[in-house]
Image (cartoon, rainbow, N blue to C red):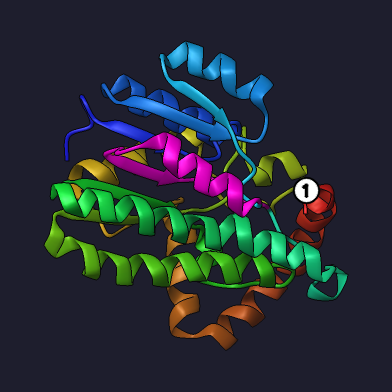
Amino acid sequence: MELRGSSVLLTGATGGIGHAIARRLHGAGASLVLTGRRAEVLEPLAAEVGGRATAVDLADRAAVERLLEEAGDVDVLVANAALPASGDILDFRVDQIDKALEVNLRAPIVMARVLGERMAARGRGHIVLISSLSGKSGQANSSIYSATKFGLRGFGQGLRADLGPRGVGVSVVFPGFIRDAGMFHDSGAKLPKGVGTSTPEQVAEGVARAITRDKGEVDVAPVGMRAGTAFAQLAPEVSAKVARRLGSDAIGKSLAAGQADKR
């Protein structure tokens, strides 16, 4: 579908990747409703792109309902908000698990359900779910995060089959390690030499391509990472052994340490 003249609800707009997505869609002519938890970050971005800002905590179910009422009949949903949720499962309290599930999985599903019905009634619309390559292959210290991102992939595939005949497109975008902004960058974790990264702008371009070309799935990662993820899906046990030898355990612990305060 065309972005020019379309209205977009973007969650997680206060992060660096959210900023890049907002600017890319604004540049394509879309009007934006931006959400995030930090109004002091959200409002300057809304002013920059001529959008509307609504501060929302997606862990609050009542707040999600209010957001959907305020958003109205948007043409596009980009569900980008997520909590890091990295770390050993035994280090998580149950309430932290619940929060990750609420923000990363339940909120996107509920928003897609409500907005998808409105789009289907008009015979036009698109839903983008931002997953992760961790939604295709789980590693040490990623069990909760991977569970939510695997869930988005399965939901997106089924939703695409449900809504496609009604004129509504559904896409799932899978970023790898993102430099300059986002969860990985903010954690301060270091990657082994040779492990490639992508930029927030590349994620934003992937989102725009998913919408305008009605792509079911879009990976945003260097060729090597995409190939490694594909291999992990075919031979998970072998892949896990290789990943450990390449330092995946240390990377996972570093990510968890850098993200623990965001659970």
Residue 49 screen position, x and y as percent: 42, 16
The structure residue drawn at horizontal position 27% and vertical position 56%, both measured from the top left corner, is 117
The foreground one among 232 and 171 is 171
Q: Which residues are magenta?
A: 60-83
The structure residue drawn at horizontal position 55% and vertical position 39%, both measured from the top left corner, is 12
The foreground one among 98 and 13 is 98
- Number of marks present in the image shown: 1
Asked if the magenta segment contains residue 86, the reply would be no
The foreground one among 227 and 97 is 97
Residue 218 figure quarter = bottom left
Residue 105 screen position, x and y as percent: 54, 62
Quadrant assignment for the N terminus: top left
The structure residue drawn at horizontal position 78% and vertical position 62%, both measured from the top left corner, is 96
Disc 1 designates what residue? 262
Question: Along the horizontal axis of the image, is 228 left or right of 242?
Answer: left
Q: Is residue 1 above or below residue 84?
A: above
SS assignment at label 1: helix
The foreground one among 212 and 46 is 46
Question: Along the horizontal axis of the image, is 162 left or right of 228?
Answer: left
The structure residue drawn at horizontal position 40% and vertical position 44%, both measured from the top left corner, is 78
Asked if the magenta segment contains residue 68, the reply would be yes
Residue 75 figure quarter = top left
> Within 10 angstroms of label 1, few (less than 14), some, or many (20 or more) residues?
few
Residue 47 screen position, x and y as percent: 49, 12
Amino acid on which disc 1 is placed: Lys
**Is residue 41 in sight in this rendering?**
yes
Q: Is residue 46 above or below residue 91?
A: above
Quadrant assignment for the C terminus: bottom right
